[in-house]
Image: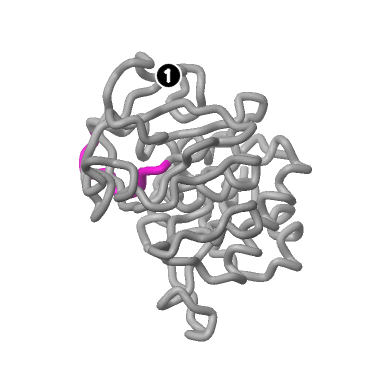
């Protein structure tokens, strides 16, 4: 049986298409490979989004800088670091295309989770230093804990009690303030939304942390385990 093909979105060097260079952290591909999948990097071509969805058995929306929010009814915060416009258009096109294939699994990481929420009618806290007493907890790949509200989410897949705090690694200055039609399934101790999902789909999960950067096996169920479950679900996607 062939291994599931997992598409991974890429970034632009210096966050600009003008660089003419795509880049991706190797650890995304390693996590997919470790989970038994075949990682494939996806170039930014919005016109080919539906074809990418057809070719891939599952999808990872990777991390990056900040979404541009004008298309969602809010001005982009003056201290935001707006992502490349073509990358944003492409990833939103992927989300739209995958809406039509409900069995296709998707994992959104950091920026990827934020785009999922915006796509589903949500909104962002665009600059955590404006709203949190200790925003540094979420930046520079800081280690902190998260607590889960729903053990049935594919984010945890009934592998831990909902109230258990588990260690994750984060690097972001924005967060989901409202997940729209998605469900909030985990938060940090300071209330920041850390994971969202669609319980009506096989695997449709967004996490604010970087599970591919896990430092130990102690938190494997919500770090490498996320990639394991994504790939396992992708083996059954149609």
Q: Residue at horizontal 33%, vertical 49%?
A: 130
Residue highlighted by disc 1: 149
Does the magenta stretch mainly form a helix, a strand or a loop? loop
Figure disc tally: 1
Q: Nearer the viewer, residue 189 or 161?
A: 189
From the image, which quarter does the N terminus lie in?
A: top right
**Residue 208 x, y percent position in the rendering:** 41, 43
* Residue 148 in which image quadrant: top left
Q: Position of residue 204 (x, y in %)?
A: 59, 36
What segment carries the magenta color?
208-217
Residue at left offset 35%, top offset 14%: 161
Q: Is residue 184 above or below residue 89?
A: above
Q: Does residue 33 appear to the left or right of 120 in the view shown?
A: left
Q: Position of residue 192 (x, y in %)?
A: 37, 35
**SS class, disc 1:** loop
Q: Looking at the image, which residue sits at the far right?
A: 100
Horizontal side of 214 relative to 187 (left or right) equals: left
Question: What percent of the width, then of the height, locates residue 74?
Answer: 58, 54
> Quick check: is 113 in the magenta stretch?
no
Color scheme of the displayed model: one colour
Q: Is residue 119 above or below residue 146?
A: below
Q: Tag 1: Cα neighbours inside 10 Å, few (<14), some, or many (≥20)?
A: some
Q: What residue sits 36% from the left and 47% below the top?
A: 210
Q: Quadrant of the C terminus?
A: top right
């Amino acid at each position: 049986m062939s291994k599931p093909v997992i598409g991974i979105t890429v970034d632009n060097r210096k966050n600009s298409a003008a660089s003419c260079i795509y880049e991706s952290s190797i650890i995304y591909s390693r996590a997919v490979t470790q989970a038994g999948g075949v990682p494939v990097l996806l170039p930014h071509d919005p016109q080919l989004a539906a074809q990418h969805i057809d070719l891939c058995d599952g999808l990872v929306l990777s991390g990056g800088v900040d979404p541009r929010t004008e298309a969602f009814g809010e001005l982009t915060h003056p201290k935001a670091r707006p992502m490349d416009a073509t990358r944003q258009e492409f990833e939103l096109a992927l989300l739209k295309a995958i809406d039509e294939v409900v069995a296709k699994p998707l994992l959104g990481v950091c920026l990827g989770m934020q785009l999922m929420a915006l796509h589903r009618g949500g909104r962002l806290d665009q600059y955590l230093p404006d709203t949190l007493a200790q925003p540094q907890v979420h930046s520079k790949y800081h280690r902190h804990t998260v607590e889960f509200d729903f053990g049935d989410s594919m984010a945890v897949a009934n592998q831990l009690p909902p109230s258990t705090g588990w260690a994750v690694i984060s690097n972001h200055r924005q967060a989901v303030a409202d997940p729209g039609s998605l469900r909030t399934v985990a938060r940090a101790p300071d209330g920041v939304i850390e994971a969202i999902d669609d319980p009506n789909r096989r695997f449709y999960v967004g996490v604010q942390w970087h599970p591919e950067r896990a430092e130990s096996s102690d938190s494997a169920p919500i770090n490498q385990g996320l990639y394991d479950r994504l790939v396992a679900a992708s083996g059954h996607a149609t």
